Image (tube, helix red, strand yellow):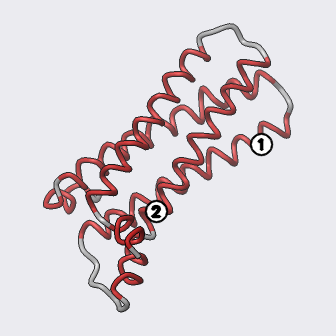
Amino acid sequence: MLFTKLLANRLFLLFISLIVTGIIGTLMVHELELMFSELSHETLAQLKEDEEGIAILLVGFGVLLEGRHILQNWIAGHEVEATETTHLCEYYGFILLALGLFIEIFDQITNLIHSPQVVFWTEVLVNYPINLYAMFLLFKIIVALANPQADAKLAH
């Protein structure tokens, strides 16, 4: 019960947001280094592995954000009134979840094609821009969770 209370807490979500943003940022920097290095099967495998990690983080954190209200209701034992922060978490949680799933879909498509050039350019032209947008959203989430009065303005 204490763990579920912690997961629904706004400040704990802020802490998790900072960790997820830091990990994804680190993976994105590593991806940039790989993109500007010599193209090899090892480089492509590392790029795909980094992108897989980003997708998993986006999906997992998106589900946590989207399920915040469900956790709050479960903790309270009854329907809890949704706050602006709850609506914000549902909104951004869904978008992060969708972005992570899009990354996975593009990775599966490139697995079927078996072309190193397609894998590389999918990473550069599709997945990396998705990652940049996800980072932008994560920064918006951090600002909103740090300042609950601002979340109504940042929701859209």
Q: Mark 2 points at which residue?
A: 64
Q: What is the x, y in percent for residue 30?
A: 54, 22
Q: Quadrant of residue 115?
A: top right
Residue at 57 percent across and 23 percent down: it is 31
Name the one closer to the observer, 68 or 135: 68
Q: What is the x, y in percent for residue 126?
A: 60, 35
Distance from Cα at disc 1 to Cα at disc 2: 27 Å
Name the one closer to the observer, 66 or 125: 66
Q: Which amino acid does label 2 sit on?
A: Leu
Total marks placed: 2
Q: In terms of secondary structure, where does tag 1 sit? A: helix
Residue at 50 percent across and 28 percent down: it is 28
Crowd tier of the residue under label 1, counting other residues whose Cα lies within 10 Å: few below 14, some 14–19, many 20 or above: some
Q: Earlier in the sequence, mark 1 or mark 2?
A: 2
Residue at 20 percent across and 63 percent down: it is 152
In the image, taking residue 79 as reference, residue 110 lies left or right, namely: right
**Which numbered tag is attached to residue 109?**
1
Residue at 36 percent across and 63 percent down: it is 89
Name the one closer to the observer, 94 or 45: 45
Q: In which quarter of the image is the N terminus?
A: bottom left
Q: Quadrant of the C terminus?
A: bottom left
